Image: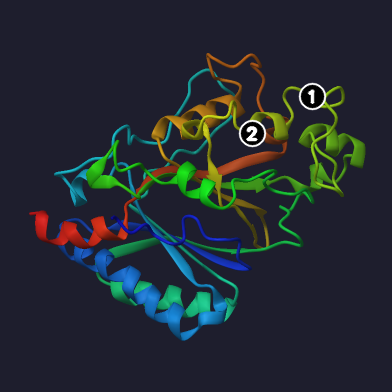
Amino acid sequence: MAREQLGICTEANLHGSYLLLNALEGHERQIRYKLARLPALIERLSDHFSEAMLTSVIAIGSNFWDSLYPDTRPLGLAPFPNPQHIDIELAATPIDLFIQIRSDRQDVTYIACQQVLQLLDGDVEIQDLIQGFRYLDGRNLTGFIDVVNPPKGRLKRQVALVNHELQPLLAAGSYVFVQQVIYDLKAWQQLTIAEQESVMGMSKVAGKELAEDLVSPDSHAVLTQSVGDEISTMLLRQNMPFAQLNQQGNIEVSFATTADALVTHLLRRLGSSDAAEIKMPDQLLHYCQFAFSAAFYAPSISFLELAINHQP
């Protein structure tokens, strides 16, 4: 049975580091070998700092996948969508490698991040390193609960991990969308609490969705929730706030068992889905801009290890 990367379905953590890396040309063989070693590196650190709940996710960019693993491509893996006829700039950006490192100790997160970079040194260029943190009781910087009614327990695995029967070679992997969202907090904070709740479609204090007769069809809660009960349409979100001197926002990381699920949710939120009854974008997007958006696939640990011996 394929071993999934533990960071995909892990519980929420207090600290996170998000590495965005581009490969140096001609270094595919070295990178393939080193990526296969990364899970064991993280596991050793996790055993040493057992109270920190350290995990990682290694994901390969849609544009880089064929260079790294030319013999096997995940079904539907494609560059991040760039829908036409919308006024929202998604800043779709090809990124070769995305590595998420999270734990409940900032020093352990730092140690893991540094050891990962030391291992990959000479084969990649660092595009960015974003530091995330848990804010209050799982809220984003708007002051609202970030993800309402997330999948729990076994449902997490069913929602996020590819089924062996559908893609045997890529079982226990996950399709990933990553977006860095910058909030216009100055404009947001000028709204009254009632106005903010109308935008979000939920109460600010309790974090519960508003009554049906009060919630707007283009509210954030409505347009980011799953449609229907089919597992194949659901997402697992592992978001974290970030804050720098001149900008603050959210790192939004979404996992799914199919590429279509990620695209469907994105288009629905943008008001660009042909199937959606609502053709208006998520109201929260009026207070956001995207620094980047990128598509990845996070293969299983088993795939990373086996691919060393089966690739040119």
Horizontal and vertical percent position of residue 147: 67, 46
Q: Which quadrant of the figure has residue 260?
A: top left
- The residue wearing badge 1 is 216
Task: Identify the residue position indicated by label 2 in the image.
Answer: 225
Image-based side of 169 in relation to 262, left or right: left
Work out whether residue 11 or residue 124 is closer to the camera in this orientation and state it: 11
Does residue 176 sit above or below 240 in this rendering? Answer: above
**Residue type marked 1:** Ser
Tell me the quadrant of the picture where the N terminus can be found.
Answer: bottom left
Residue 259 at x, y percent in the picture: 40, 34
Residue 286 image-quadrant placement? top right
Instruction: Identify the secondary structure beneath mark 1.
Output: loop
Report x, y in % for residue 247: 66, 55
Q: Looking at the picture, does residue 189 appear above or below residue 45?
A: above
Quadrant (top left/top right/bottom left/bottom right) for the C terminus: bottom left
Q: Amino acid at mark 2?
A: Gln
